[in-house]
Image (tube, grey):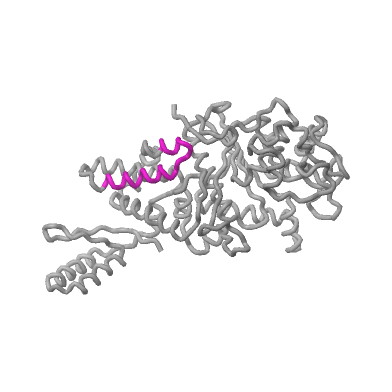
Amino acid sequence: MMQLKIYNTLTEKKEIFQPIDESNIKMYVCGPTVYARAHLGNARSVVVYDVLYRILQKIFPKVTYLRNITDVDDKIIKAAQNENTTTTQIATRYANFFHEDMEYLNCLSPSFEPKATNYINDMIDLIKKLIEKKKAYIKNDSVYFDVSEFAEYGKLSKRNVKEQINSVRIAKNDEKEDAEDFVLWKVEKNETDAIFESPWGRGRPGWHIECSAMIFANFGDTFDIHGGGSDLKFPHHENEIAQVCGAYPDAHYAKYWVHNGFLTVEGQKMSKSLQNFITVSDIREKNLDGEIVRYAMLRTHYTQPFDWSEDSILNAKRDLKKLCDTLILFPELQNDENLNDLNLYDKFFENLLDDMNTSSALMSLQTLANQIHIENDKKIQYELASKIYNSLKFIGIDLFALIKKYLSAIDENLISQLIEERKIAKNKKDFKKADEIRNKLIDLGIEIKDLKDGSVSWFQTIRFS
């Protein structure tokens, strides 16, 4: 059986993935807070776990992938007030935008997408349990988790509490008994449409309790994989563990914790103050194909920082052009029903099984393309080309979709005429005109190669805009 190795943040080592129940793998990934358009950092995380979802689906008979929607949050309330509308309208609008943006990046839909507002009662029940276990306390109608009462606090981030608190911004709050305690339920005295009834008064849940309650309601207290960005490791994921394991001491919660690296822009942290804040919508407006963006992200290992830059896109286009130009030589592949069998390149999939090493997997396909061009057996060439197509399609990149978009219609008579005119120019030693004709052919998407016997071969290529 194929074995997936994955880096587990909890144990700080790469492990062989051993599911709790092989008949149904359970994976949860923190989804968007829907108050604005998704930025590239959000997109990278979704792409990473989309690849993991695809790998798991190939290995196991069933994978249940949950990715939540946070539709109650201070930022959503503020956005609704600024636009003089309701939080529901804001959340619905940006959830729809999020789905459009992720579809553009060829991400599969999760098995289920729980919304926080549908789990308020579950959150209240979990908070009650924490109070009962003396892991939480009530103060001025709000409820706080008592970090001092949970001995394992910090086991995910591997730092002591004081170090963790000093490493992140935690707003001062005189209502709490200690700075590191975090809110489970906060009283709301101002009237908004995001207020819910609770045993402690009208208010709304804290952010951390939302994920814990949604996971517990759908997966119970123990499941296989929890994913998210590195920025969520502390305090969000640490607090999730504390909440469920505090309420249910025998719980394990997530067996494997997976965190993807940060995204930078031209080597700098993405921020509005630096005017380098980029949303997926910004990229779409530039008519940059989702396959190119996705490929660019996957050229970097998911645990490493990914730098969005002009070079990252140029490199992705260069690699994809080479692969597309190779597949152009085999147009019959498009109508080959066997392509649906997902006959992947062995080396490619071996790299994916090794902690989702997409960077090495993609490099293996470049090597495969080189092999095709030096192989003389047409049958072997065809088989290798099909593996390139299948392997990329498996991780959400359709080369024939790119070829269809960027391959221009050609006039073979015109090409023959231009090649003949170039030959005449070269014979007359008019190399300037010969170069001009070559460039004209390139503009038409035609590459030419001068052979030793004096003849010229040509082949069609794509040119990304």
Q: Nearer the viewer, residue 329 or 439?
A: 439
203 displayed left or right of 98: right
Q: Nearer the viewer, residue 118 or 239?
A: 239
Q: Residue at x 56, y 31 (%)?
A: 25
Q: Residue at x 87, y 42 (%)?
A: 139
Q: Is residue 359 above or below residue 60?
A: below
Quarter of the image for residue 241 reads: top right
Instruction: Estimate the x, y position of residue 110 in percent, counting from the top left.
Output: 58, 42
Q: Is residue 441 above or below residue 334?
A: below
Q: Which quadrant of the figure contains the C terminus? A: bottom left
Q: Specify whether residue 354 is painted magenta.
A: yes
Instruction: Estimate the x, y position of residue 173 in percent, counting from the top left.
Output: 81, 49
324 displayed left or right of 122: left
Q: Nearer the viewer, residue 4 or 381?
A: 4
Quarter of the image for residue 230 reads: top right
Q: Magenta stretch?
A: 349-372
Quarter of the image for residue 434 reads: bottom left
